[in-house]
């Protein structure tokens, strides 16, 4: 089993926050789904003002549906201020509903 953290659904976020590229993660998700027998789940931590817009979440869900299928579980989890992001508020409960 693999639970992959999809940190966000924009290249800008991956480049600035993760010092990586979104395409690498998407390619890995597609590989796990279509070329292995691994049970795949995806988790996205919703960070207020960073990756929680309706448009971004919708784009992520659409990509997952179209490229991985509707039977891949997706979990959206709440951010809480910690470490280097103490100035960012916690994810409102309403964002997760």
Image (cartoon, rainbow, N blue to C red):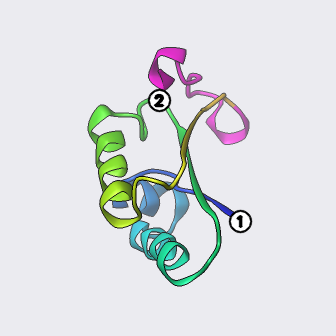
Give the mark nearer the N terminus: 2 vs 1. Answer: 1
Numbered badge on residue 1: 1
Boundaries of the magenta span: 82-97
Circle 1 residues within 10 Å: few <14, some 14–19, many ≥20: few
Numbered badge on residue 81: none
Residue 37 rendering spot, x and y as whole percentages = 62, 77
Above or below, comparing residue 78 to residue 14 in the picture: above
Residue 53 rendering spot, x and y as whole percentages = 33, 34
Above or below, comparing residue 94 to residue 91 in the picture: above
Residue 85 rendering spot, x and y as whole percentages = 62, 36
- Residue shown at the point (47%, 54%) measured from the top left: 71
Query: Where is mark 2, residue-wise?
Result: 48
**Mark 2 or mark 1, whichever is nearer to me:** 1
State whether residue 22 appears in this view. Answer: yes
Above or below, comparing residue 30 to residue 14 in the picture: below
* Residue at mark 2 to residue at mark 1: CA–CA distance: 29 Å
76 left or right of 37 in image:
left
Along the viewing direction, whichever of 18 and 65 lies nearer the viewer = 65
Residue 31 rendering spot, x and y as whole percentages = 50, 79
65 left or right of 36 in image:
left
Residue 83 lies in the magenta-colored region: yes
Above or below, comparing residue 86 to residue 28 in the picture: above
Circle 2 residues within 10 Å: few <14, some 14–19, many ≥20: some
- Residue shown at the point (52%, 18%) measured from the top left: 92
Q: Secondary structure at mark 1?
A: loop
Q: Quadrant of the N terminus?
A: bottom right
User: Looking at the image, do the residues carrying marks 2 and 1 touch, with CB atoms under 8 Å apart?
Assistant: no
């Amino acid at each position: 089993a693999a639970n992959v953290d999809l940190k966000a659904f924009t290249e800008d976020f991956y480049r600035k926050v993760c010092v990586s590229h979104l395409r690498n993660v998407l390619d890995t998700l597609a590989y796990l789904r279509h070329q292995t027998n691994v049970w795949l789940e995806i988790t996205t931590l919703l960070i207020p003002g960073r990756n929680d817009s309706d448009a971004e979440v919708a784009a992520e869900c659409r990509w997952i549906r179209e490229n991985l299928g509707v039977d891949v579980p997706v979990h959206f989890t709440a951010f809480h201020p910690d470490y280097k992001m103490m100035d960012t508020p916690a994810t409102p409960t309403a964002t997760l509903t």
